[in-house]
Amino acid sequence: MTPTSSGSVSSERILILSPDGRFSQTGSSGYMSSFEGAGAGTGVAGGNTAPLESGTYRVEDYQLLLAGEDGRTETLSLFLPEPDSDDLLVIGGNNYLKED
């Protein structure tokens, strides 16, 4: 028998930043991995903690500061690849496309 392994990762995050300084977001991520060989197998699966769902935000330098209604806070890096356009933002290392 030939040993085999497989795995996958899935992620989706939707972030809405309103002009009034409020945000809302939804999303999740998870992973799965398995290995079979020599008559035995093993597997692992998991996911992340829930993101802040809503609250207020502000931008300072190259950071997006989120303050959730539940009292949690999150600081994400913020990068604008094209200085004259806000169609694409890189937030926390992830690309976000602007929707009208």
Image (tube, rainbow, N blue to C red):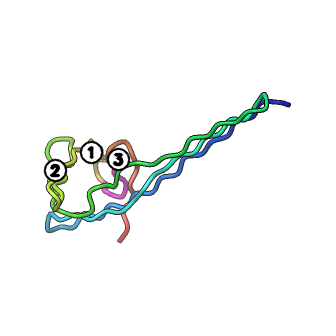
Q: Quadrant of the C terminus?
A: bottom left
Q: Residue furthest top?
A: 38
Q: Quadrant of the N terminus?
A: top right
Image location (x, y in percent) of residue 16: 29, 65
Q: Are marks 1 and 3 in contact (CB under 8 Å)?
A: yes
Q: Which residue is mark 2?
A: 59
35 vs 77, left or right, is right
The local secondary structure at tag 3 comes to: strand
Q: Which residue is mark 1?
A: 78
Q: Which residues are magenta?
A: 85-91
> CA gap, disc 2 to disc 1?
8 Å
Q: Are marks 2 and 3 in contact (CB under 8 Å)?
A: no
> Nearest the camera: 96 or 26?
26
Image location (x, y in percent) of residue 6: 67, 40
Rate crowding at label 2 as few (under 14), some (14 to 19) or many (20 or more) other CA atoms within 10 Å: some
61 vs 81, left or right, is left
Q: Which residue is mark 3?
A: 90
| The image quarter in which residue 62 lies | top left
Numbered circles on residues, count: 3
Q: Residue furthest right?
A: 1
- Whichever of labels 1 and 3 marks the residue nearer the N terminus, that label is 1
